[in-house]
């Protein structure tokens, strides 16, 4: 009996060693400032001005230049994002570029656990936030279409949409899915691009479909708000916030890097099932933690430190006797 118990304990120890980089600490969320909490709760999005340096912007744009030929244009009718007749429609098409987590250049991997961005992901999604969708770069020339309004906390049949939710409990925001949009060129007033219906993350009614399509000028002019940004600004928004994009009007290419993050134990997307095409092999320990499958932090989940990537990860510690008990009962390291 004693020999069996020692074997079980050794198996638990062997598993623990595989996540040895994780410091055994109880970790608290970083939180937002009072001003940031107010603005996110009010509007459903938050702009972090100048989050990326000029060098970082240059690094990201240079990586896009090297891979721009790989972008796929949404020319097919089935891929169109907006009705031509509405305020979101235009003749040109958007181009989508993916695969950046596996590029030789590491600029896009850095955004997974960036020291200026990770605290916002942590505060909006909780400890152990994780990448939920494959990241992508949106590219648009002048005269290309935007994207009809979408998202929101309700389905088209007015039922609750549990996949896209926002709540605020005990002074802390909680989201099931948050988008992080890193703007790599300027988008001044009238440029087009990202737009929102402010406060719609708390809506109790579905946006009428003709308004989503931009077919009502009065609604569009009064309630569809283009968020003005400069290169290096990063916008965080709840996917429960109704959002879209207006046609791009500037004489230079629009470039935006889009990431979607979820809670530690929640998944909307399925890309983690193929282990992000092996991207973790190129990542730091903190970046790898963001690529993990969904499971709860209390089960010793390696997590990005609240202050961002410092070369290490942290984790809650679970009692060794409880882990040994799991192995004895289930034959697996965790229940």
Image (tube, helix red, strand yellow):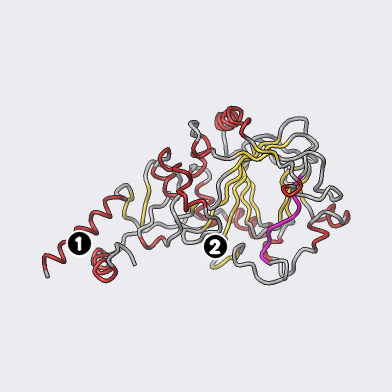
Q: Which quadrant is home to the C terminus?
A: bottom left
Q: Quick one: 154 or 46, which is closer to the camera?
A: 154
Q: Is residue 148 magenta?
A: yes
At label 1, counting other C-alpha atoms closer than 10 Å, the crowd grade (few under 14, some 14-19, many 20 or more) is some
The N terminus is located in which quarter? Answer: bottom left
User: Does residue 11 belong to the magenta stretch?
Assistant: no
**Decide: marks 1, 2 in contact (CB < 8 A)?**
no
Q: Give the SS element for disc 2.
A: strand
| In the displayed structure image, the side of residue 198 where residue 15 appears, left or right | left
Which of the pair 74/300 is nearer the observer? 74
The residue under label 1 is 9
Q: Quadrant of residue 58?
A: top right
Say above or below: 6 vs 77.
below
Q: CA distance from mark 1 to mark 2?
A: 38 Å
Q: Residue at x 61, y 54 (%)?
A: 35
Would you name the residue on which mark 2 appears?
Answer: 172
The quadrant where residue 173 appears: bottom right
For the magenta stretch, what is the residue range?
146-154
């Amino acid at each position: 009996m004693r020999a069996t118990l020692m074997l079980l304990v050794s198996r638990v120890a062997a598993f623990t060693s595989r996540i040895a980089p994780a410091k055994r600490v109880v970790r608290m969320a970083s939180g937002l400032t009072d001003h940031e909490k107010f603005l996110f709760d009010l509007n459903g999005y938050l702009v972090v001005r100048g989050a990326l340096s000029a060098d970082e912007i240059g690094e990201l744009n240079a990586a896009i230049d090297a891979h721009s030929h790989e972008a796929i244009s949404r020319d097919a009718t089935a891929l169109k994002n907006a009705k031509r007749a509405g305020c979101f429609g235009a003749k040109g098409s958007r181009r989508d570029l993916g695969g950046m987590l596996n590029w030789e250049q590491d600029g896009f991997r850095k955004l997974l656990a960036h020291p200026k961005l990770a605290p916002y992901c942590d505060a909006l999604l909780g400890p152990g936030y994780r990448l939920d969708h494959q990241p992508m770069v949106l590219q648009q020339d002048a005269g290309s279409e935007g994207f009809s309004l979408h998202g929101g906390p309700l389905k088209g049949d007015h039922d609750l949409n549990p996949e896209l939710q926002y709540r605020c409990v005990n002074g802390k925001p909680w989201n099931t899915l948050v988008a992080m949009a890193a703007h790599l060129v300027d988008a001044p007033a009238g440029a087009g691009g990202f737009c929102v219906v402010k406060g719609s993350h708390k809506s109790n009614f579905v946006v009428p479909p003709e308004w989503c399509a931009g077919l009502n000028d009065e609604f569009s002019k009064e309630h569809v708000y283009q968020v003005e940004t400069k290169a290096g600004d990063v916008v965080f928004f709840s996917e429960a916030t109704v959002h879209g994009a207006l046609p791009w009007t500037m004489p230079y290419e629009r470039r935006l890097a889009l990431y979607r993050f979820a809670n530690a134990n929640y998944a909307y997307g399925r890309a983690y099932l193929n282990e992000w095409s092996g991207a973790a092999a190129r990542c730091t320990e903190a970046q790898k933690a963001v690529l993990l499958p969904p499971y709860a932090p209390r089960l010793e989940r390696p997590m990005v430190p609240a202050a961002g990537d410092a070369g290490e990860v942290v984790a809650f510690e679970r009692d060794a006797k409880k882990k040994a008990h799991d192995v004895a009962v289930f034959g697996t390291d965790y229940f």
